[in-house]
Image (cartoon, grey):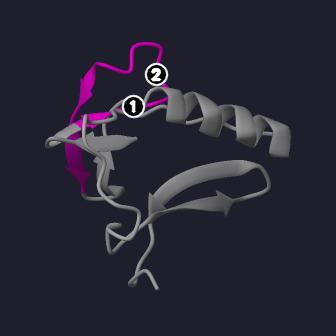
Amino acid sequence: MEIYNEEIRDLLAKNPTNRLELKEDPDKGVYVKDLTAVVVKDYAEIDQVLTLGNKHRTVGAVRPPPHRRPPWPACPQISGRHALKMSLCVGRRR
């Protein structure tokens, strides 16, 4: 998932230019409607998914310097045995 210019995009979708919606559900909490979920079996598949997502990222004409990173980085989370999910880390980057 990428949030760029206040638009949410699914970097793993067949058409990553489609805009997604942020929703709220009493049971699930806040979520992104129709966001792609991928189950991976090993590190090679994790690498394939991350590579695909990186290919679909929006890259602006001017990149910020490397020392200017957002205070809350995206972190992979492994839930269960084989599920990988990207989410925002809580806390500040050091």
Residue 43 colored in magenta in the image: no
Q: Left or right of 20: which side holds 91?
A: right
Query: Is the residue under label 1 in contact with that under label 2 (CB below 8 Å)?
Result: yes
- Tell me, yes or no, if residue 59 can be seen here: yes
Q: For the residue labelled by badge 1, is the local secondary structure a helix, a strand or a loop? A: loop
Whole-percent x and y of residue 68? Answer: 32, 68
- Which residues are the magenta region? 8-25
Q: Residue at x 68, y 49 (%)?
A: 83
Occupied quadrant, residue 58: top left
In the rendered image, the vertical position of residue 50 relative to residue 91, given as above or below: above
Amino acid type at mark 1: Asp
Q: Which residue is mark 1?
A: 10
Residue found at the very far left of the displayed protein: 6
The three-letter code of the residue at mark 2 reads Ala
Q: In x, y percent, where is residue 3?
A: 27, 44
Percent position (x, y) of residue 50? 62, 39
Left or right: residue 66 compared with residue 85: left
The residue where tag 2 is placed is 13
Residue at 38% over, 21% down:
16
Does residue 42 appear in the picture of this structure? no
At a point 63% along the width and 33% down the height, the residue shown is 51
x then y, percent, for residue 6 = 14, 43
Q: Specify whether residue 15 is painted magenta.
A: yes
* Rendering quarter of residue 17: top left
